[in-house]
Amino acid sequence: MDTKDLEQIRTEARARELKELRRQNRKYFLISCLSVTAFLLLWQAVVSFHLVDTRFIDSPAKVFMTVVDKWTNNKPEHGLLWQHIIASSIVVWKGFLLGAVIGIPLGLLMGWNRWFEHTVRPLFEIIRPIPALAWIPIILLFFGIGERARSIIIFFGAFVGDTLNSYTGIRSTKQVYINVAKTCGAKDPVIFWRVGIPSAMPMIFAGLEISIASSWGTVCAAEMLAASNGLGYMIQMGRMFGSVSLIMGGMAVIGIMGYLSTYIIEIVEHFVLRWRPSAS
Amino acid sequence: MEAERVMTVKKSRNPLLEGKGPLYRILWYAAPYLMLFAFLLGWEWVSTRGTVVFPTPVSTLKRLVTVWGTRIAKKPMIYHVWVSMRRVLLALAISVLFGVPLGVFMGWNRTFRAIMKPLFEIVNPIPPIAWVPLITLWFGTGEVPRLIIIILGVFKPIVINSYAGVAMVEPLNIKVGTVFGASGRHMLTDVVLPSSLDAIFAGIRNGIGGGWMVLLAAEMLAARSGLGFLIQQGSNADDLELSLVGMTMIALFGIVFAYGFDYVERWLCPWKKK
């Protein structure tokens, strides 16, 4: 019958569309791969043909070898790569988690309770524009230059961002949901816990991802300014001893660590938010 | 009579204060000030009773006033403030000029996106501050390398947000544009760009915030002028008051920038409802 032919035509058209889409995706994927390869080749060529003084640049191969070598070689600054990685990671995660533990509840309360917001907001708005690094002299005075001091610097950076995102997240809770909860007879704290917080979760996690990225940046700066181990310190030492590949290798490692951290947060998010039909 | 009664119903400006007594109202308006006062008291306690020497709020305030006549590193205070502002504004201008078109083009043209996005994704996780040693190795410690570092910090969010703004335009809007006969360039300027202005401005705002951080880092690490340098100098010279003054100035400027930018945004996008 006519309708059956129509169904057939529709499915065939859909199959063709999908094939075309897949072909296009493959084409763009290929372009992307070519682009990265071209970049690496260009980099290698610049070094091999001595277009730039080797004081300023090292080939990608050399950078990679330096990173691998650094795992066991403790020149020039008496530290091994994994020691630096662990030192930096501990500082980052400690500060980040402290910032999350304090910032998220603060933001949630500020967004939920008008009295709380009204009271705390001005103080928060004063602290907010001060970048984390600006706290360094004060922290240096009270806590010295140990690992704990650096964690606190990271805390200041992460805390502000987390609070803001939690605040925005819980403020965007749909009034409909709150009304439904009220209709079911829920009291305010229960609505906060059962409706407000889950509503705010996507925004909170988005904020956490940004937070961890900026924490890595802050730890880098903090280590360059006042530390004796860690990836930022390693990069700074590379600069001091004129080893470009150490600098570039360190940068690459930090990049990888940042990427891994974001990935970890994403995994946690998928686990926590598995009740959502559309995974954010 | 009926109409008059309706017209004289008072509209309470704050629903939380509706029908509450005078004591409640006084407490409401005083609450934030009480909180700030408690904070200042805590500060005062730390600086007088604490184990380390730390400036009191009063002495910080006094220094905030007197510092304008003094010279630090042979330059007057106003020079440091001006230099910091200039760096941020310049970096912002360059980043917006190059970053927005780049991001928009990345979102608009799939081939360009396929070429540029992976390169971007590789550079993305590296914090701008991590570039400092490399840039100082390549360009020394002058003003240009500092500017480059700050641009690196401001550039990223601008490009990412511009790209996201263009790539995530409502398909409905594009369909409407097609129905009205827009194509190619017209589609871009009349449909896509206005609806992505929101995201672009969010990107610029993030860029300013990030740029502030990187400015501070660059000035603390490799500069002899600017607010970040003041903070570092205060730390080096055991003159913590100077650091606090620097922090206050930075905070003030952060607020000024944020409000200024809100104003610019509202001027350029009058259709946006807050």
Image (tube, grey):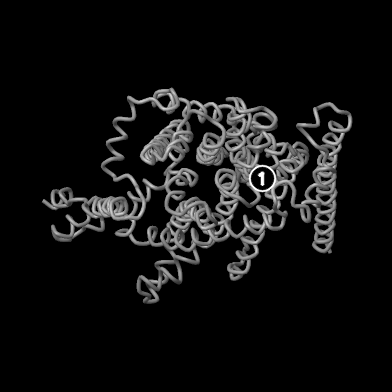
Q: Amino acid at mark 1?
A: Ile
Image spot of residue B247 (x, y percent) = 41, 40
Note whether residue A10 is visible. Answer: yes
Q: Secondary structure at mark 1?
A: loop
Image spot of residue A154 (x, y percent) = 52, 53
Farthest bottom residue in view: A185
Instruction: Please tell me whether residue B267 is drawn above or below residue A87 in the rendered image.
Output: above
Taking the spot 30% from the left edge, 30% from the top edge, the residue there is: B66
- Frontmost residue, B188 versus B268: B268
Locate the C terminus of chain A and report the quarter of the image it occupies.
Answer: bottom right
> Horizontally, is A208 left or right of A60 in the view?
left
Q: Residues within 10 Å of mark 1 (few under 14, many from 20)?
A: many
Note whether residue B270 is visible. Answer: no
Q: Chain for mark 1?
A: B
The residue where tag 1 is placed is B126
Image spot of residue B135 (x, y percent) = 66, 33
Instruction: Please tell me whether residue A57 is drawn above or below residue A9 in the rendered image.
Output: above
> Horizontally, is A179 left or right of A73 in the view?
left
Taking the spot 14% from the left edge, 59% from the top edge, the residue there is: B23
Farthest right residue in view: A49
Taking the spot 75% from the left edge, 38% from the top edge, the residue there is: A244
- Frontmost residue, A131 versus B114: A131
